[in-house]
Amino acid sequence: MKLFEKKCPNCGAQMSFKKDDKEVTCGYCRKSFIIENDNPEGVFDVESFKLINNTMGIMSGMHFVIFGIALFMIVGISVAMFNNIKNNKINNNPQPIINNGGTKNNTEKDSNYLTKYSEIGQDLIDLNREGGINALDNTINFYVEHFMPKIVNSWEYVGSYFLVRNETSSRMQHNILYDIYSITYKIDGENKTYYGVVVNSDFMRSGDKIVTLGNTLPAVPRNDLKDGKIAFGYISLDSVFNELVGKNIDFTIETNTFEG
């Protein structure tokens, strides 16, 4: 069945879908879009398709739960504040309402973010690596049967960079972890290795646990080969560094596991 390609309206990555598909999800930014055929003649060409932001797809069941909890808390706080003001008026002794949640300053909050890779802990490191392989697989899964050269090996972890934000940086992230994986394709009878990257950020202490507040974002650029085939990944470890890691001039490379 013929596949159609459109650029993601959110991040610009290439997406593919069939003419009968009702929805498509970007493999890079994970945004979902409704596919609408704008050609009344029923002729299917790439220009006849419109991609409409699927707000219902973004608003997942978990989002509804979070929204409900937030709404409940807002209503509860509003009622409590109203009763407090009402009681103060009755007692003719008005008291100021104090927001205790605003007592922490930014310096105290920033101190919870990790500054060393060794602080993450092996359990979370292993969990991230397993999730990273799944994220990379999901990114290229659609293309495997249709366009990909034969995959000789599955994704294999090869190393990490852990970056920490400089004090003068204006970036929102406090730290960034780049986990790098290799994959080997059979191209023209020869094995060729490419590299995929999975990015996590904002590792911090939350009570007695270490958590990450950032999304798991796979980075696997598309390489068009001859005969219409596609290979996903960076062509070398140097290109991974030059195109991703090295561009973070507001950060210091705290850990480079390639150095052992």
Image: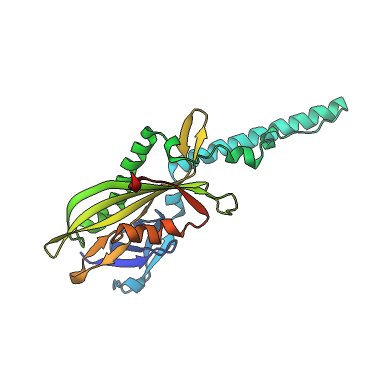
Q: Position of residue 200 (x, y in %)?
A: 42, 46
Front in this rendered view, residue 255 or 194: 255
Q: Residue at x 58, y 41 (%)?
A: 110
Q: Residue at x 80, y 33 (%)?
A: 96
Colour scheme employed for the rendering of this structure: rainbow
The image quarter containing residue 119 is: top left
Kindly tell me whether residue 39 is visible in this rendering: no
The image quarter containing residue 62 is: top left
The image quarter containing residue 4 is: bottom left
> Relative to residue 168, is residue 19 depicted above or below?
below
In the image, 100: left or right of 166?
Answer: right
Q: Position of residue 25 (x, y in %)?
A: 36, 56
Outermost front residue: 259
Front in this rendered view, residue 247 or 94: 247
Q: Position of residue 72 (x, y in %)?
A: 59, 35
> Relative to residue 56, is residue 206 depicted above or below?
above
Kindly tell me whether residue 108 is visible in this rendering: yes
Q: Position of residue 108 (x, y in %)?
A: 62, 37
> Relative to residue 98, is residue 250 depicted above or below?
below
> Relative to residue 22, is residue 41 depicted above or below?
below
Tell me the quarter of the image containing the C terminus: top left
Outermost top residue: 91
